[in-house]
Image: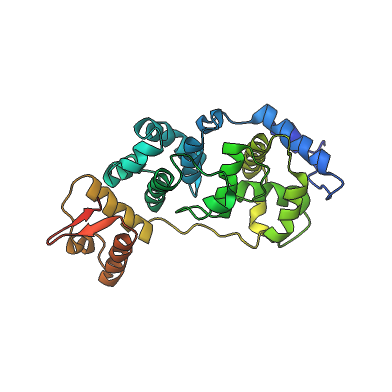
Amino acid sequence: MKKTRQSDLGTGIPADPILHYPQDTRKFQKIVLNHYREYGRELAWRRTAEPYRILVSEIMLQQTQVERVAAKYPLFIETFPDFASLAAAPLGDVLAIWQGMGYNRRAIALQKCAQRVMNESGGSLPSSVDTLATFPGIGMATASSICAFAFNMPVVFIETNIRRVYIHFFFSDTDVVNDEEILPIVQETLFREDPRTWYNALMDLGTSLKKTVPNPNRRSIHYTKQSAFEGSDREIRGWILKSLISGKKITDMIIIDQFPGDPIRIRRILATLEHEGFISRGEDRLSLSS
């Protein structure tokens, strides 16, 4: 009986994933780019290199599935089309549009980025990885990704889909893989003629692998499984912010009644939200920060 090959399943992924570094660099590039030509996704933020829109998409894509971002991104851009409009918007308006994306602290970080661009950079996003990495909510990986997609710079970085691709193709016989082992291969195999296309291609190949093979990222030393949402601090934070956005009167006791069992936990969450700039305290109620 003929053994089914992955390439026969319509993924364009070779059945034998084993490649060797550095001798198979060209072969690897061909696999990645051929897959993208055949199966690359049409996404709104891929139709632009405008730095503002790239920044919005990159912050949105942190810890959020592409499908959810694709649904929310057009409305966000329509409501806040540039750095100036986002920087000047009331926080409540930003959070209202952000609803459904989760991890609401990203929304306030994104607005702070816009305010910094307007106040410090004359309305233009810096094209330096090191500078961008100092912006709220942006680390080195996100800063590098922004530079790749907005400025087509040949930067080197790893995110979850990229990691999945390299482990699958270059570490198929390794039980535990560290990013420090992957980075030199990312550097060597980078398609420098068009980094923007290259990283889009890597990410789409990583998405295809997630659907066709056991997750290679489980062999990464950096792998963590997201905790359950129900009953989590994230659920409570989301409920508080959604209630405030809708105009409901919210107090500590109302929240404790909604999530009984641990008043100290509720007060800790509220203190964190206040420290992060989401909420303010009045005499008899909580409110969104202005």
List x then y, in percent, for residue 130.
57, 53
Image position of 127 (left or right of 123): right
- The image quarter in which residue 177 lies: bottom right
Q: Nearer the viewer, residue 149 or 253?
A: 149
Image position of 29 (left or right of 128): right
List x then y, in percent, for residue 41.
59, 31
- The image quarter in which residue 212 lies: top right
Image point 70% across, 60% down: which residue? 180
How many discs appear? 0
Q: Nearer the viewer, residue 203 or 78?
A: 78
Image position of 59 (left or right of 24): left
Image point 78% across, 45% down: which residue? 17
Q: Is residue 267 visible?
A: yes
Q: Nearer the viewer, residue 206 or 90?
A: 90
Q: Is residue 4 visible?
A: no
Say above or below: 38 vs 210.
Answer: above
By what rule are the colours in the image chosen?
rainbow
Image point 80% across, 38% down: which residue? 3
Q: Quadrant of the N terminus?
A: top right
Image position of 172 (left or right of 76): right
